[in-house]
Structures are given as structure tokens and as C-alpha cells.
Image: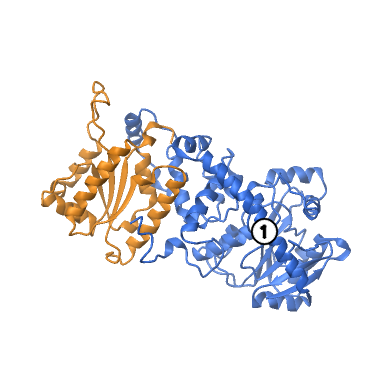
Chain colours: A orange, B blue
Amino acid sequence: MAEEKSEPIEEVTSVEEKPKPTKKVSAAEEPFEPIIVGFLCNWCTYTAADLAGTTRMQYPPNIRPIRTMCSGSVDPVYVIRALLSGADGVLVGGCHPGDCHYVSGNYKARRKMTILKTILNTLALDDDRVWLKWISAAEGRKFADTATAFTEELKKQGPNPVKKYWST
Amino acid sequence: MRNAILEVKNGNLLDTLDALWRQLLEKEIVEALLIPQELPSRLNVVQTLVSNPESLQVPNPLAPVLPVNSARIVSQMTKVTPSNKKVGVVLRSCELRALIELVKLKQASLENLVLIGIDCFGTYSIDQYRKLAQETSSPTEDFLKAVNEGKEDPLLREACQSCEYPTPLNADLTIGLVGIDFEKGILLQASTPEGERILEMLELKDSDEKTVAKREEAIAKLTAQRAKKVEEILERTQQEASGWENLLTLFAPCINCHNCKTVCPLCYCKECFFDSPTFEMEAEKYLGWAEKRGTIRMPTDTLLFHLTRMNHMAVSCVGCGMCQEACPSDIPVSNIFRLVGSRVQKIFDYIPGRSLEEELPLATFKEDELVEVG
């Protein structure tokens, strides 16, 4: 995350346009690296990601962070869009309950994400590809651990099946 | 709460009700009425706003057709400023429930409105109603006769066949037909002081308790029947809509017309995100996606639209089925919304349209809830 702070634009572009495996390399040779889109609250989880970076904690580079002003501002449409665009997982990170910079945004995020996950679950669309985690600005370690755990979990689950379909 | 009996003269329910609507205006109980009337062609019955009893043409709120969920109309009338005149709005249960949701969403105002709810036995599609109207002189009479004989009509809209609220909630005055021998008399139920004022001005005699008890029993029986039908539909829809493959099959005929959104009484955004410039993109973007995925469906974002709409309003979905009616491709949109709606509403123990006091689930929260999610 330290790098990201110094050259944020290049960081984002470079992960977005990750070099695609050339046709010569078959899928079997290339291990599956899940792509996680992270919607991270400016006041806590985003700062925690920064902290994890500046303190040089090791964690898998699978998260593509997007800074939001509050987890409560993450409309489900962002998450669905990410999933339909082929993200293997989506992490929404906010301040711990009671600690929201805007008093109650994270409680509202929890309701929104509950509805989203319930709808995904009802339609058998892998609701466990969406995680909502509370990570405070001081919890660089928790961010690194969450990134590791989510990446591992998604590796077990395999690629997002929606990628098989172009007709979305 | 007061129950009164309105005697039906010569067994003609429609004439009796006709006289009732005229009285409401003549006695100045209300200054205007929002009431469904038959169009001159008799092929459709639409909402109308009438302020003069003489210009009341052929009011027929019992006609088994629902072209528009009138909650939208009330919202259109009262969103900018509340009504300055006393208006009686004649609504079915699904319309009234949607209106309550819209009031909570600050898209309508009940100020100066008298909510007149009518019992509803269901409605046909506009197309079906037109066909019946071409064949017979009064589809409404035929329909009510069949209802009286206890016949189930498979031609009714699926949303109506599975409606668990045949009687209106939150009405000032209810025109009660379920469980009532409506060839002899209908039950007028006042649930608010406003409703009681109307009964007083109409100078009606009270009904006996037996009639009310019989009605309660009939409602319970009908609701139980409908609940069974709901279960059937939800089970079928669950199978049809499970997994990406099935969901994509279900939405394959979608032409992105967004009719479902346009007619939905609860799609509350004044400006839809999906009609916003967010989705006006450069050719480069589309080509980029196409390059990445090989092929992309055009127009894009079909499933994104439907899944997002579910997230935005399934919690307030009253199941009126207008979306399904408006779908040119006959996608069972309403059934899918009923399915996801039933699940999300259960989480918050929320029934849309049940009460004005209950807060919208997305407008409130509890500190110690849903800890399994986050």
C-alpha cells in the first residue's frame, strides 16, 4: 500500500490491466489467482491497508482497492457490477460498529450487504464471494490477515462462474 | 372501528356503489374522487379524478383490471405539494400498500386524502379484460357472479391469484365484499375517525356482529388458500431462477426496455441510475470489454439492472405484479421479486404497506443485529 500512496493512479491502472496470460500458457500451468475488488472506507479500512503496506506486512496482492468515503456509500450496484465483470470476490471494509466517521453509515452498510447477500443466496449465486469486514485504521494486521484469508478462500472456491457467460 | 351495512337495491351491486360515489361528492364528504371509471369504449377501466358529481361517468372500481398501480398516480398528485382539497382515493389493497411505502419514501403525502379501500378478488391483464369486454356486456358482473359461486378463475393475473391481501390495509373506509352476501348488502368498515365521519354523514345503520365475524372467517380462508398458491409459485420460481445459468435463461428475452422499472410503484428514485449518464460510455469502453471477454451482450448490463433493482426495492415490493404485466417478453419478473422479497422482508420482519410507523429497513438499523454478516 505504501507504493500506492506515492503513485496511486499508476497502481490502479497497472492492476486493472494485469497482463493477460499469452495463449501459449495453458490454464493448468497458470495457478488461479483470484481478483478481489475492495471497497474500502477512507477513514478506516483504506488507512489500514496503507498501514499494512507502510509496515511492510506480507499479504497476497489480489485485492484491487477502491477508496470510498464510507462503507455506507457502497451501493449494492457496485458490488454486483464487480461480480458481473468477473471479480472473484468483493470485500467491503468499514469502521467497527459504533465507530463510523459519519455516525451510522456502517450499520446501514450492514443492512445493505445483508440484503445483497440474501438475494445472491436466494438465487444460488455464491453469496460467500461478498465479504463485509470491520477493520479500523490501526488494524493493518487485520487487513493483511483478511486479504490472506479471503484470497485462500476464493482459491478453494475457484473462479467466479459468471466469467463463463458473456450473455449477462 | 365501526361497521355499517349499505343495502344493495334490486341485487344490483354496481348501481348501489355508483350511488355511493355520487353521494360522497354530492354531500361534499369529499371534494374530489380519484376513482376508476370505464372508458367510453368500455374496453378498459382507468383511474380518473372527478370533482363534480354530475361529471361522474361510469365509475367502476370493482372492474377486474388494473392498468396502473394507482399509488403512482397518488404520488404524482401529492409529491410536489400535498393536496389542498379533501380527495377520496379509491384503491385496491396492492395500491394502498404501495402508497404507504411511497409515503415512507417521501414520494407521496396522505394529507387531506381519504383512503377508500376496496376488497379485491383479483384482476385480469389489460389484454384479457379487453377481450372479455368485447365478448360480453359487463365483465365485472360476470366476474362477481363467478366469485359469488366460489369459482376460481385461472385467467386472473398470477400476482392476483397469489395475493395474500384481498382486503385493504390502512384504509379510512373499506368497501367490504369478501365473506359478504353482496347481492343483498355490502359492509362499510371505518377504521379511523375520518372513516367514521363518512359513515355518519351517509346515515347508514350498523351491521350485526355476525356479518363481521363471517367476513373475518372468509378472509382467513381466502388468505390461507392464497398462501398455498404463493408457496407453489415461490417454489417453482426458486427452481427456475437458481444459479447463473438459469437466471440468464430467465432473463434471456429481456430487451432492456426498463418497463418493469417504469411501472413499478416502488422504484422510488426520481432519476434512475440506469438512465443516468453513468451508462453513456465511449466506444473504447465497449470495445475494451469485448476484447477482454471475447463477446459481450449488447445492450449491456441486463442482469446488472435486474439484480440492482431487486436490491433497491425488494424490501418494499408489494407484489402487485405490474412489472410482469409490462414486460413485453413475459419474463416472470414479479415472481422473482416475490421470491427475493419474501426472503429479505423476513429478515427485518417487515411487511410493506403494513404500517406507516414501521421504518423502512434501509432507513434504520439496530446496533446489535446481523453480526453474522459483519
Horizontal and vertical percent position of residue A79 = 36, 47
Please give the name of the residue rendered at 63% of the width and 51% of the height, measured from the top-left corner.
Answer: B228
Q: Residue furthest right?
A: B10
Please give the name of the residue rendered at 61% of the width and 68% of the height, measured from the top-left corner.
Answer: B170
Compare residues B205 and B52 and report the one nearer the observer.
Answer: B205
In the picture, the quarter occupied by the N terminus of chain B is: bottom right
Q: Which of the 4 quarters of the picture holds residue B195?
A: bottom right
In the picture, the quarter occupied by the C terminus of chain B is: bottom left
Q: Is residue A34 above or below residue B272?
A: above
Q: Is residue B289 above or below residue B139?
A: above
Relative placement, left or right, of A131 versus B358 is left
Please give the name of the residue rendered at 59% of the width and 45% of the height, measured from the top-left corner.
Answer: B233
- How many C-alpha atoms fall within 10 Å of the one at disc 1: few (<14), some, or many (≥20)? many
Give the residue type at disc 1.
Pro
Relative placement, left or right, of B72 versus B245 is right
Horizontal and vertical percent position of residue B298 = 44, 34
Compare residues B340 and B319 and report the one nearer the observer.
Answer: B340
Q: Which of the 4 quarters of the picture holds residue A29?
A: top left
Compare residues A124 and A80 and report the one nearer the observer.
Answer: A124
Horizontal and vertical percent position of residue B306 = 47, 45
Relative placement, left or right, of A47 versus B1 is left
Q: Is residue B115 above or below residue A157?
A: below
**The disc numbered 1 marks a residue on which chain?**
B
Count of labels in the image: 1
Compare residues B248 and B214 and report the one nearer the observer.
Answer: B214
Residue for badge 1: B166
Relative placement, left or right, of B334 versus B368 is right
Q: Residue furthest top?
A: A24
Q: Which of the 4 quarters of the picture holds residue B301?
A: top left
